């Protein structure tokens, strides 16, 4: 999950395609990924929950991206392990997380949210 987030930040389309379950790859997937990478500037990632049972795992996370000043993608993702490799299957979108203005900012600046990306 973290490595897929990094790949989104760094624009590593091949890695994103390789870790997407083959049954989920659509025609035009590469173009769609390139487009989304070009248009999104990611600011930070918070992993909220992670469970694994055998060859299945679920990760709940919030990823923040720039959008005057920011928006969030709150998702519960499902992964499966096949032949020793983990694949992203699909994700369930969840409502935006409520953030405390006095909490440390999600971007990792060390400042409070209200003094940073608020
Ligand atoms: Zn910030």
Image (spheres, rainbow, N blue to C red):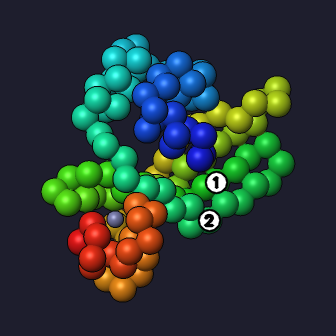
Binning the other alpha carbons within 10 Å of mark 2 as few (below 14), some (14 to 19) or many (20 upward) gives few
Asked whether residue 99 appears in the rendered view, the answer is no
On the rendering, which quadrant does ligand 1 occupy? bottom left
Residue in the image at 56% along x and 67% along y: 48
| Numbered tag placed on residue 58 in the rendering | 1
SS label for mark 1: strand
Instruction: Check the picture and name the quadrant holding the C terminus.
Output: bottom left
Q: To which residue does mark 2 refer?
A: 49
Residue in the image at 47% along x and 22% along y: 13
Binning the other alpha carbons within 10 Å of mark 1 as few (below 14), some (14 to 19) or many (20 upward) gives many
Residue 101 x/y as whole percent: 31, 82
Note whether ligand 1 is within 8 Å of mark 1: no
7 is higher (above) or lower (below) than 64: above
Residue in the image at 36% along x and 47% along y: 42
Residue 77 x/y as whole percent: 55, 49
Residue 62 x/y as whole percent: 45, 60
Residue in the image at 38% along x and 74% along y: 111
Asked whether residue 105 appears in the rendered view, the answer is yes
111 is higher (above) or lower (below) than 107: below
């Amino acid at each position: 999950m973290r490595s897929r987030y990094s790949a989104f930040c760094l624009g590593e389309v091949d890695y994103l395609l390789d870790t997407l379950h083959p049954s989920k790859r659509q025609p035009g997937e590469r173009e769609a990924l390139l487009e989304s990478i070009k248009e999104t500037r990611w600011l930070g990632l918070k992993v909220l929950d992670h469970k694994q049972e055998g060859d299945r795992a679920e990760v709940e996370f919030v990823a923040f991206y720039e959008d005057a000043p920011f928006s969030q993608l709150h998702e519960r993702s499902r992964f499966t392990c096949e032949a020793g490799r983990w694949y992203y299957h699909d994700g369930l979108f969840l409502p935006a997380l409520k953030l405390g203005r006095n909490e440390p900012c999600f971007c990792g600046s060390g400042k409070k949210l209200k003094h940073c990306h608020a």
